[in-house]
């Protein structure tokens, strides 16, 4: 249940749905409690249930008095209505996508030199030019990737919202498509996978264009292919709630795979610490309250969550930070009157790009933490 205008949705048990029906029928809290207890054969705290609904913003009035409602953040591109983008749900699009992938595969077989490598990113000896193309093309593709999620979600009637966020050390764009759970599974999976499909389609199109253009254009197109494909491995890092994570959550029929997995991991960590310190453990396993199929999925996912997070942070310390610091140091040492204009310009561009990206990450991370705390 939930509200599309505030994009807040929760899963409630069957008895919660029964309590909601009783309240909708005009019963008071006391009457609903009595009738629900008689029907179920045990006591239920309908008052606490109603208070939870009020905190979620799901109750409009209490005894005829309006309940204050916090303003919801506006949806992105409100002028785009579901009927404007209904084509995104057409079964023809997957067929066209497969045809494009097959054409690119044929081109690669005929022209093995079109196979992308990491060297294609270094298409220019000037680091500023390489960074400028990577950032410009990369963030353009990020926007198009998120726009694909947005378009499919809006086609189903979901008022999606595109924002910046962080995933561990990564600055990311994300599209809130809360409410897509009410759509048919085919539409849900299309919404989750639409962004990855766009990246693959851009890469395939660039390969086809490179197959019919000269060598000069080939270098830029090859870099575009790599830039389009680079985000795809990131989407399989399911411990960070990426696109594939939502597919996994949907296929395992879990309500909150990440939240429940994190809670189970914290429980195991606390139990291990208490065993080492020979302390008594009175905490209850949070996964025991879940249905059997969810419990198995959550426990398996918690291992992936812990291992993936540890490896990601290790990569940050071992590779990302040293690389960024090296680039910043090299750029800084190229500044000054003793260096050429080109060297100074190259250093300034590198410092501006890296500094801006790290500043945006820090501001986004702080705002996200502040919203959670409030």
Image: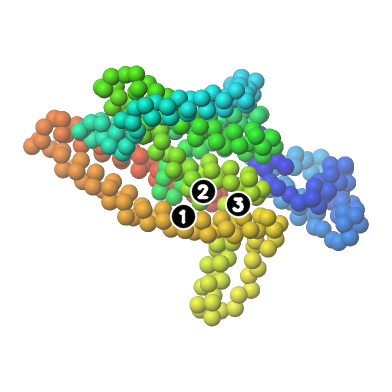
Disc 3: which residue: 257
At 58% from the left and 43% from the top, the residue drawn is: 246
Assess whether mark 2 and mark 1 are in contact (beta carbons under 8 angstroms). Answer: yes
Assess whether mark 3 and mark 2 are in contact (beta carbons under 8 angstroms). Answer: no
Give the side of residue 331 with respect to residue 7, left or right: left
Identify the mark nearer the N-term, 2 or 3: 2
**Where does residue 94 sit, x and y in percent of width and height?**
57, 27
Q: Residue furthest left?
A: 338
Mark 1 neighbour density, 10 Å: few (under 14) some (14–19) many (20 or more): some
Identify the mark nearer the N-term, 1 or 2: 2
Real-space CA distance between mark 2 and mark 3, rounded to the nearest whole angstrom: 10 Å
Identify the mark nearer the N-term, 1 or 3: 3
In the rendered image, the vertical position of residue 366 relative to residue 37, given as above or below: above
**Where does residue 311 sit, x and y in percent of width and height?**
41, 56
Q: Quadrant of residue 355 in the image?
A: top left
Give the side of residue 68 with respect to residue 119, left or right: right
Disc 2: which residue: 238
Badge 2 element: helix
Give the side of residue 54 with respect to residue 210, left or right: right
How many marks the image carries: the answer is: 3
At 55% from the left and 63% from the top, the residue drawn is: 266
Q: Quadrant of residue 134 in the image?
A: top left
* Camera-side residue of 363 and 357: 357
**Where does residue 179 sit, x and y in percent of width and height?**
66, 37
Mark 3 neighbour density, 10 Å: few (under 14) some (14–19) many (20 or more): many
Find residue 308 and name its label.
Answer: 1
In the rendered image, the vertical position of residue 165 relative to residue 305, given as above or below: above
Quarter of the image that includes the N terminus: top right
At 11% from the left and 32% from the top, the residue drawn is: 340
């Amino acid at each position: 249940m939930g509200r599309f205008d505030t994009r807040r949705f929760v899963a409630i048990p069957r008895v919660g749905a029964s309590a909601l029906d009783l309240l909708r029928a005009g019963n008071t809290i006391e009457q609903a409690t009595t009738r629900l207890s008689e029907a179920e054969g045990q006591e239920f705290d309908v008052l606490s249930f109603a208070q939870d609904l009020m905190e979620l913003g799901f109750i409009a009035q209490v005894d005829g008095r309006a309940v204050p409602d916090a303003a919801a953040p506006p949806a992105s591109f409100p002028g785009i209505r579901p009927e404007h983008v209904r084509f995104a749900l057409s079964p023809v699009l997957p067929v066209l996508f497969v045809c494009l992938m097959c054409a690119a595969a044929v081109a690669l077989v005929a022209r093995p030199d079109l196979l992308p490598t990491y060297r294609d990113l270094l298409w220019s000896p000037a680091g500023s030019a390489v960074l400028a193309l990577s950032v410009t093309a990369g963030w353009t593709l990020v926007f198009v990737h998120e726009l694909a999620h947005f378009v499919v979600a809006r086609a189903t009637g979901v008022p999606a919202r595109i924002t910046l966020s962080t995933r561990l050390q990564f600055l990311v764009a994300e599209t809130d498509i809360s409410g897509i759970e009410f759509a048919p599974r085919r539409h849900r999976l299309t919404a989750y996978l639409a962004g990855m499909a766009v990246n693959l389609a851009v890469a395939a199109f660039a390969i086809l264009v490179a197959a019919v253009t000269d060598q000069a254009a080939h270098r830029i197109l090859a870099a575009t292919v790599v830039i389009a494909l680079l985000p795809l491995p990131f989407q399989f890092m399911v411990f960070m709630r990426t696109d594939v994570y939502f597919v996994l959550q949907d296929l395992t029929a879990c309500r909150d795979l990440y939240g429940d997995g994190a809670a189970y991991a914290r429980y195991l960590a606390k139990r291990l610490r208490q065993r080492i310190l020979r302390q008594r453990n009175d905490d209850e396993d949070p996964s025991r309250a879940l249905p059997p199929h969810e419990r198995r999925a959550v426990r398996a996912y918690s291992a992936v969550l812990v291992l993936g997070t540890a490896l990601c942070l290790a990569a940050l310390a071992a590779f990302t930070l040293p690389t960024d610091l090296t680039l910043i140091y090299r750029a800084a040492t190229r500044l000054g009157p003793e260096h050429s204009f080109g060297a100074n310009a190259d250093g300034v561009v590198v410092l501006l790009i890296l500094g801006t990206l790290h500043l945006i990450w820090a501001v986004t991370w702080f705002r996200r933490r502040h919203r959670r705390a409030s």
